[in-house]
Image: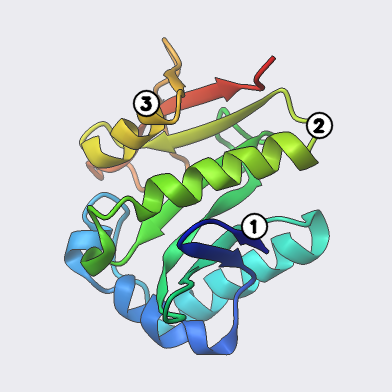
Amino acid sequence: MIDTGRLTLRGWRREDHAPFHAMCNDPRVMRFLGPALSDADVIAAIDRQNHFLDSHGYCFWAIERRSDGAFLGFCGIKPGPDGTPIAGEVEIGWRLAHEHWGQGYAREAAQATLDWAWDNLDTPQVAAMTVQANEASWGLMMRLGMQRVVGGDFDHPLVPEGDPLRRHILYRIERPA
């Protein structure tokens, strides 16, 4: 677990299913991420993150607000997906329920995640990706000190051809000296 002033980043629990499912069916949240997730998709996503946690010691952790235990979304690191320019690298990512946007939670969780990665992993860099239109996401990447990779744009292999979300942009941050 990672604790910040307001948040706990932790492994996934059974009770996270309902709020995660609701979040992944909110068109505002999924606007730049793809179609809504079915119940089976949500279960598979939670299982996948818990598998990363068991096998690597990290995942896209569930975010819990410390003051009331509310599930806010997720933030963490995982292995970069196969078929992308960050396969085999450490990828940082986040997703918060709409009602928790604009309160600094994503920045707080992402900074804590980067700090954890530098303290616990022997990785020279951390990568992130999103679609060009997702200004909030790449804006956070920049506020974290990440740099857009020139010439690093790519078509995500898991997004169908012709889908406007297929083209992704890539950011990286180097390990602090």
- Tell me if mark 3 has few (under 14), some (14-19) or many (20+) residues whose alpha carbon lies within 10 angstroms of its own: some
Q: Quadrant of residue 165?
A: top left
Going by the image, does 84 lie left or right of 89? left
Rendered residue at 78%/57% (across/down): 57
Does dot 2 land on a helix, a strand or a loop? loop
Question: Alpha carbon of mark 2 to alpha carbon of mark 3: how far?
Answer: 23 Å
Q: Find residue 33 and report its horizontal and vertical position in percent.
A: 32, 53
Give amino acid for label 3.
Met
Residue ID for mark 2: 122
Mark 1 highlights which residue? Answer: 59
Residue type at tag 1: Cys
Judge by depth and name the residue closer to the eye, 59 or 2. 2
Does any portion of residue 65 appear in the rendered image? yes
**What quarter of the picture does the C terminus occupy?**
top right
Q: Position of residue 102 (x, y in %)?
A: 22, 52
Q: What residue appears at the point 56 percent right and 46 percent down from the top-left corner?
A: 112
Instruction: List x then y, in percent, for residue 136.
Output: 25, 40
Counting other residues with Cα less than 10 Å from the Cα at mark 1, is it few (<14), some (14-19), or many (20 or more)?
many
The residue under the point 81% across, 31% down is 122
Q: Amino acid at mark 2?
A: Asp
Asked if disc 1 and disc 2 are in contact, CB closer than 8 Å, the reply is no
Q: Earlier in the sequence, mark 1 or mark 3?
A: 1
Mark 1 or mark 2, which has the lower sequence index? Answer: 1
The one nearer the camera, 105 or 172, is 105
How far separated are the C-alphas under marks 1 and 2? 16 Å
Instruction: Kindly identify which residue carries mark 3.
Output: 142
Cβ atoms under marks 2 and 3 closer than 8 Å: no
Q: Is residue 4 above or below residue 151?
A: below
